[in-house]
Amino acid sequence: MAASTHTVTNQAPPLVGYDVFTADRALVEAVERHLDPALLDEVRAELSGLGLSAGSAQVQEWGVQANENPPKLRTHDRYGHRIDEVEFHPAWHRLLGKGVAAGLTAAWSRPGGQVRRAAAFVIWSQVEAGNGCPLSMTHAAVPALRTDPVLAAEWEPRLTSLVYDRGLRPVAEKAGVLFGMGMTEKQGGSDVRANTTAARPLAEEGTYELTGHKWFCSAPMSDGFLVLAQAPGGLTCFLVPRVLEDGTRNVFMIQRLKDKLGNRSNASSEVEFDGTWARRVGEEGRGVRTIIEMVAATRLDCVLGSASLMRQAVVQAIHHCTHREAFGGKLVDKPLMRNVLADLALESEAATALGLRLAAAYDDGGERERAFLRLAVPAAKYWVTKRCTPVVTEAAECLGGNGYVEESGMPRLLRESPLNSIWEGAGNVQTLDVLRALQREPQALDAYLQEVGRARGADHRLDGAIKNLLTELADLEGIEARARRLVERIASVLQGALLVQYAPPEVADAFCASRLGGDWGAAFGTLPHTLDLATVVERARPVA
């Protein structure tokens, strides 16, 4: 019999056995808002099934196992043959298989595909964010490959398959494939035009031999990769298959795996090409233009991934405070803690609303929506991913010392939280891209202003923020040095406009008062005390 001193009391139970989708009111409402009503019953059932899986004890344990057993590189077999393979824990394959089966690579082939996939990505990434990389790369490869109808016909049906067909074999023998990407090199980083990997044309039209290196190559056990290399006509996009048509391995030497801060279940690698066979995608010299659609899709996934991390951190904090007692009552009922939780919930809901709005614009595909995305995607990528780390840090603090312990799961979320801001191009890359859109594509700003203009007159603080933004946009003097401030305002005004139109009044009021009206401190938990914060917290609370 246990000693009385070991009796465990006043601890929150595990947040397990619940539907991650239906417990997220902001996400449910966004799906209902952006989807054709004829699809709603089907999609609700689909997402609820995935949500129940994500909230189950078994799948959450898979996430822990995948994180605690990172991939291992095997460059050679026992006989000395070069194989360049990465071994993963079985939990990784289970998670990745479920992600593929849930349609996380199938958005381009289903009605309302971008919105339903975006919601699924937010749900599934809350289990373990590492498997999001191959899912994202595979999804994002489709628009780039569509620049070559022959390649698209060969690869797209397998890229959008619901079958996770692991193992390296010729693409013609596989029911489903995964894609990775290799753009950055040691000497250039985000400046991909500084790439030195060389592409030498071969006798067969459209085929080349690559020689060079990639400092970051995602998902190295994928079936194919989109990479950039210098062809005679300039920087060009290429498709590099891992296995050639005759079944032999392409030259794809994995030099090492990155030892990363977070995202440890996923393999990020350095690779060398030495006579590597490749197929040109698009025209020579137009590599950036060809691959930019893939980049844009991965940027949206960075927004969704950060929204997912924030949501999981916030629900863990609210769940803990709902059950934990201190100073004579539940933590969630303490005015100061309620202020903190409400502040975090606002950030989470604003990120979710923005991410799903961008996905809906992809589904629409019209000229105005494409122009809107040109400005909104890099702005959202900059701001939402920047907000992730402070949100997760504050949420972990809500658990006190428990939040600093690995078993709580909060340290894993915290290590993951900076990744999406760094991935593809850090904050300055995004802000400079926004400036390019403003300077070269006036239709992008017009579309953005039409979008936020839908909410004008509904909240005086939003109206004031729009007016101030227009004043700042009219003054282009020294704009690069203040680009971060400008892009922050572009993103937060857009979030405010969405919340004013679609969120409950208590949520919109609190967001506009703090983020747009200036009644806010430098840390979370500094919302105006006169707001209805209890309603904001209750809306974000998960119901297990």
Image (cartoon, rainbow, N blue to C red):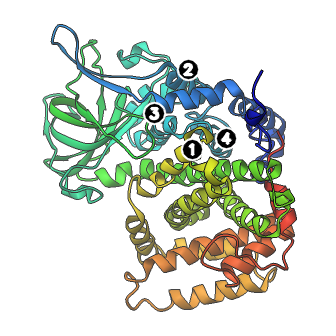
Nearest to N terminus: mark 3 or mark 1: 3
- Residue depth check, mark 3 versus mark 1: number of the one nearer the observer: 1
Decide: is 492 above or below 36. below
Q: CA distance from mark 4 to mark 3?
A: 18 Å
In this rendering, the label closer to the viewer, 3 or 2 = 3
Q: Is residue 201 left or right of residue 50?
A: left
Residue 265: mark in rendering: 3
Element under label 4?
A: helix
Q: Is residue 153 above or below residue 492?
A: above
Residue 54 is situated, as x and y percent measured from the top left of the image, at 68, 33
User: How far is the residue under mark 2 from the one under mark 1?
Assistant: 37 Å
Query: Rounded to the nearest whole Å, what is the CA distance between mark 3 and mark 1?
Result: 19 Å
Residue 127 at what x, y percent from top left?
61, 36
Amino acid type of disc 3?
Answer: Ser
In front: label 2 or label 4: 4
Dot 3 crowding, Cα within 10 Å, few <14, some 14–19, many 20+: many
* Residue pointed to by mark 4: 123
Q: Mark 4 near mark 3, Cβ–Cβ under 8 Å?
A: no
Q: Residue at x 62, y 41 (%)?
A: 408
Work out whether residue 240 or residue 465 is closer to the camera in this orientation and state it.
465
Of label 2 and label 1, which has the lower sequence position? 2
Disc 2 crowd, CA 10 A, few/some/many (<14, 14-19, 20+): many
Q: Which mark is on residue 405?
A: 1
User: What residue is pinned by disc 2?
Assistant: 163
What residue is shown at x 53% (from left), y 71% (from top)?
Answer: 444
In the figure, 73 relative to 409: above or below?
Answer: above
Observer-side mark, 4 or 1, equals 1
Between 317 and 215, the residue placed more toward the observer is 317
> At numbered mark 1, what does the secondary structure look like: helix, strand or loop?
loop
Residue type, mark 1 in image: Val
Residue 363 visible here: no
Viewer-side label of 4, 3: 3
